[in-house]
Image (cartoon, rainbow, N blue to C red):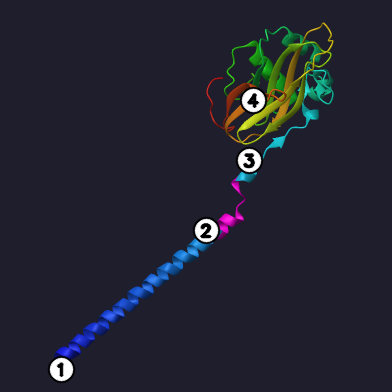
Amino acid sequence: MTNLFAIGQQCGGNVGRAALILKSDMNRLSFVFGFVVLLSATAAAEPPIASTMETRSIPLSEIVTTSPQKGLRHIRDTRFETNNKWDPEVFLQQIHNVSNGGSNAFIVDATNLYDALWASLDVLTGPRRVDAPVPVNRSKPERGNFWLVAYLGSGPSNPSWWTISGVTVDKSKVVLSYQESKPSPATADVRHYYYWVPLGKLEPGPYEIQLLDVDKGVVTLMRRVDVKPINARGGSR
C-alpha cells in the first residue's frame, strides 16, 4: 500500500508539473501572438515606402532657358529675380564663348537661380567634377535645393531646334524629355540651348540623369550623380 501511495503521489506531482509547464507555454504563446498583432498594427499605420518614390513632374513654366521655346522662361527675363545682381547679357556672352561640344547634363546645389547659374558656369568653364551636385564657388554657400542643368547643343534660333516636352523626378532618376524640330527653313544664326530646371529637394542617394529623345525613344545621354546629406563632407569637387 505504501508503494502504491508513493507512486500515486509521484504521478500526481508529475501531472502538476506538466500542468504548470503547459500553462507557462500557453502564456508564452499568448505573449508572442499579442506581439505579432502589435507589429502588424504598427506596420499598417506606417505609410507605404512606395509613397516616397512617386514620380513628380516639373512645370515647363519654371524652366529657365536660352531657348526661344514658348512656355519656358527666357534667361533675359530673370534679371529682377536676382535683385539686379547680374546682367543676363554678360552671362549669355560668357556661356556663348564656352567650347560647348556635345550635349551635357549635371546637377548644381543652389537655393536660388543666381547661384545656380554661376555654379553651372563654374562647371562649363573649369575642371569641376559633376559626379555630385556642384555648389556655387564661394565660402559656405547655402545648400539643400537642386537644379538640373542641361545642354542639348547648338542650332538656329528659329525654329526652336529642340523642344522640351517634360522633366520628371523620382527616387533615383531625373529625366529631361525633348524632341528635335522637324526639317524646315531656319535662320542662319547659332544659339546654344541651355536649360536650368529647379528640382527642389532631393533624397540622399544615387540618381541617374537622362536626356531622352522622345521621337527616337532613346536615351542620348546618361550620367550618375550621388546626392549626399547636406551635412556630409563630400570631399573636393
Within the magenta stretch, is there residue 107?
A: no
Measuring from the top left, give residue 25's x and y in whole percent: 37, 70
Residue located at (68% from left, 18% from top): 120
Please give the label number shown on residue 210.
Answer: 4
Question: What segment carries the magenta color?
Answer: 41-49
- The secondary element bearing badge 4 is classed as strand
Q: CA distance from mark 1 to mark 4?
A: 94 Å
Q: Amino acid at mark 2?
A: Leu
Asked which quadrant contains residue 159, the reply is: top right
Q: Are marks 2 and 4 in contact (CB under 8 Å)?
A: no
Q: Earlier in the sequence, mark 1 or mark 3?
A: 1
- The secondary element bearing badge 3 is classed as helix
Q: Amino acid at mark 4?
A: Gln
Q: CA distance from mark 3 to mark 2?
A: 24 Å
Q: CA distance from mark 2 to mark 4?
A: 40 Å
Look at the image and tell me in which quarter the N terminus lies: bottom left
Q: Which residue is mark 2?
A: 39
Residue located at (35% from left, 74% from top): 22
Q: CA distance from mark 1 to mark 3?
A: 80 Å
- Name the mark nearer the viewer: 3 or 4: 4
Q: Which residue is mark 1?
A: 1
